[in-house]
Image (tube, rainbow, N blue to C red):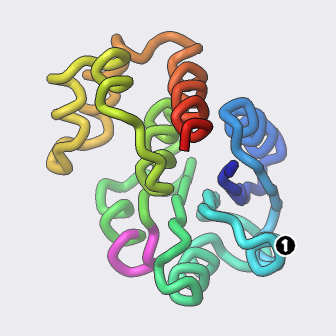
Amino acid sequence: MRKKILIVDFNLYSLRELKQFLESNEFIVYSAQDGEMAYKTYLEDKPDLVITEIVIPKIHGLHLCKRIALESEHRTPVILISGIYKSIYIKEEVINFYGASAFFEKPINKRLLMWEILKLLNIRISEKILFKKIGESELIEMYDESIDYKKIADSAREKISSKEFFHDIIDEINKELETL
């Protein structure tokens, strides 16, 4: 069963780019350009995950995040993104106070974003696939939560530089799901 993701961004270019990326990785994607439309879409379509820009009109992204986190009892992960808020404290604040599951600065590293999405949606990737694609030592580092995203990106960049990396993983997951 394909997972549903709601993406929210006031910037139409960013919205389209992220939507194309997620759809190319076999997700069903809903989009909105403001918090009000996003909340309505969230209620109607029940996405499995929400990715929202912090600065959006009508309902601020932080308030949208907190509302979804509380109403879903933290069952719907929310990833906050921002091109404006870039303080080292913002990640901690959005997770601890607003209930976000993750935070990414723009420009978004799409491979790291995909890694986070797979993790948050509990899409299990067999160790055999990951060892083949990334390598055991890099995989162990990725699971270590004490390592920051930049370090993960630097260590993983060489192994996952291919454009086909996540397409291959999605194909492998779909093959495994077909056998269930």
Locate residue 123, reporting x and y percent: 48, 48
Residue at 51%, 66% (x, y): give it: 77
* Residue 3 appears in the figure: yes
Q: Which region of the structure is painted magenta?
A: 95-100
Check disc 1 and report the residue beneath it: 37
Asked if residue 19 is positioned above or below residue 52 in the image, the reply reads: above
In this rendered view, identify the residue nearer to me: 178 or 98. Answer: 178
In this rendering, position of residue 100 left or right of residue 93: right
* Residue 60 sits in quarter: bottom right
Asked if residue 20 is positioned above or below residue 86 in the image, the reply reads: above
Asked if residue 69 is positioned above or below residue 57 in the image, the reply reads: below
> Given the image, on which type of amino acid does mark 1 rest?
Met
Locate residue 16, reporting x and y percent: 81, 39
Asked if residue 51 is positioned above or below residue 11 in the image, the reply reads: below
Q: Residues within 10 Å of mark 1 (few under 14, many from 20)?
A: some
* Residue 154 appears in the figure: no
Residue at 34%, 28% (x, y): give it: 153
Magenta stretch, main secondary structure, is loop
Q: Is residue 57 magenta?
A: no
Locate residue 38, reporting x and y percent: 77, 70
Residue at 62%, 63% (x, y): give it: 48
**Secondary structure category for the residue under label 1:** helix
Q: Locate the C terminus by quadrant.
A: top right
